[in-house]
Amino acid sequence: MLVKAIREALGAQGLILRGGFHPGPDDDAPPGTETLLLIGNAGPALWRVFESAQPTGQDSLNYWTKDILTAIAAQFVATAVYPFEGPPYAPFFAWAKRAEPVHPSPLGMLIHPSFGLWHAWRGALAFPERLELPPLEPAPSPCDGCSDRPCLTACPVDAFSNGVYDVEACAGHLRTDEGADCMALGCRARRACPVGMDYVYEPEQAVFHMTAFLRDRPS
């Protein structure tokens, strides 16, 4: 019942419960944590709530999300953890692999069998008690059956061609007229993936994230 109530509280804010697990000593969870629930978003649902709230300022999405999760953590007597606070930074990718069936993609991002590449983790709730959780249902990586790998050839500057993300090539392209498509609609390589097309970010959402990406990498 507690997990259901948490799921409903998150849903009202466009957030989703991304699974959970009972951490061991090697999981780097906050001390005393018996249950860790991952919180995130997929598609445009969170964006629509965020946009209607009209928060402003640099890193507005992070601070807005933190305000929401801090309140939810207090409501359910948990400790909130965020991926953008550190160092040391919490190992969210490792936690995600414990909580739900996500896999590394050729682009380096973790791909979800339903959400594709259109998802993110916004925080976690750490509980001192051991909550009852449904067992993790394994699912194969959708990349295993993808022979064409269109994500690797869609980038105009081949930022993923060598198996390592060329951040500078990507940012440089976005600053040119030729990069207007990626700025307006989101990463072309990401859009080339056929998985999770129902969760593709809306144009305003894509612009927000691409602008933040460039702001963090001044020319």
Image (cartoon, helix red, strand yellow):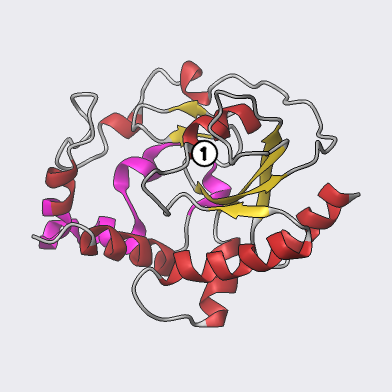
Residue drawn 71% across the image and 30% down it = 22
Residue at the limit of the structure toward the front, as seen here = 31
In the rendered image, residue 175 lying in the magenta stretch gets the answer yes
Left or right, 51 with reference to 17: left
Under circle 1, the secondary element is: loop
Residue 62, x across and y down, in percent: 46, 64
Can residue 100 be seen? no
The answer to whether residue 19 is magenta is: no
Horizontally, residue 115 falls left or right of residue 78, namely: left
User: Picture coordinates of residue 81 (x, y %)?
Assistant: 56, 51
Determine whether, in the image, residue 193 is placed left or right of residue 26.
left
Q: Few, some or many C-alpha atoms within 10 Å of disc 1 (few <14, some 14-19, many ≥20)? A: many
Where residue 36 appears, as percent x and y from the top left, is 67, 40
Task: Please determine whether, in this image, residue 48 is positioned above or below residue 115.
Answer: below
Residue 208 image point, x, y percent = 36, 67
Residue at the (58%, 37%) spot, across then down? 29
Q: Amino acid at mark 1?
A: Gly
Q: Specify start and end residues of the magenta stretch as a single range.
A: 172-200
Helix, strand or loop: magenta stretch: helix
Residue 14 showing in the rendered view:
yes
Q: Where on the picture, by quarter, is residue 180?
A: bottom left
Residue underneath mark 1: 116
Q: Residue at x 76, y 63 (%)?
A: 9
